[in-house]
Image (cartoon, grey):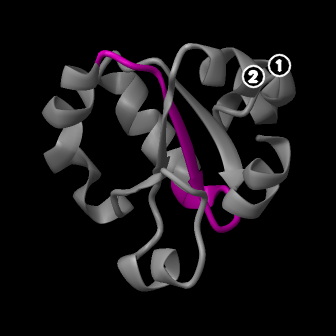
Amino acid sequence: MGLLDFLGMGTKTESIQDFVAKGALIIDVRTPSEFAGGHIKNSKNIPLIGLEDKINEIKKTNKPVIVCCLSGMRSAQATSILKQNNIEVINVGGWKSLESKL
């Protein structure tokens, strides 16, 4: 397992398109003030600190999840939490990088 796999980033480009094709939710785990400063259209802001409280809500959507933040560190933590709860997830790192790939 490489570092990118450990961070939940694996083969990002192919996976992003696969996840989008499956109707994935895009969850931005930055703070509300960071999110208000700019975000991906139709993404949902669930700050990392409150993510565990939203697990059941996320599971009910029955959709895979694309997680982003500012640099990829918080989204890596979020990816770990979601995987532990059997949610199909990919960490794409920074939201601006993801935006350019959508």
Q: Which residue is drawn at 51% across and 81% down?
A: 34
Q: Is residue 77 above or below residue 64?
A: below
Q: Is the C-beta separation of discs 1 and 2 under 8 Å?
A: yes
Q: In which quarter of the image is the N terminus?
A: top right
Q: Residue at x 39, y 19 (%)?
A: 63
Towards the viewer: 77 or 12: 12
Q: Is residue 19 above or below residue 40?
A: above
Residue 95, x across and y down, in percent: 67, 59
Magenta region: which residues? Answer: 62-74
Element at label 1: helix
Is 39 one of the magenta-colored residues?
Answer: no
Q: In this view, does 81 lie above or below 19?
A: below
Residue 9, x across and y down, in percent: 72, 33
Name the residue tied to disc 2: 17
- Write down the quadrant of residue 6 in the picture: top right
Say left or right for 79 vs 61: right
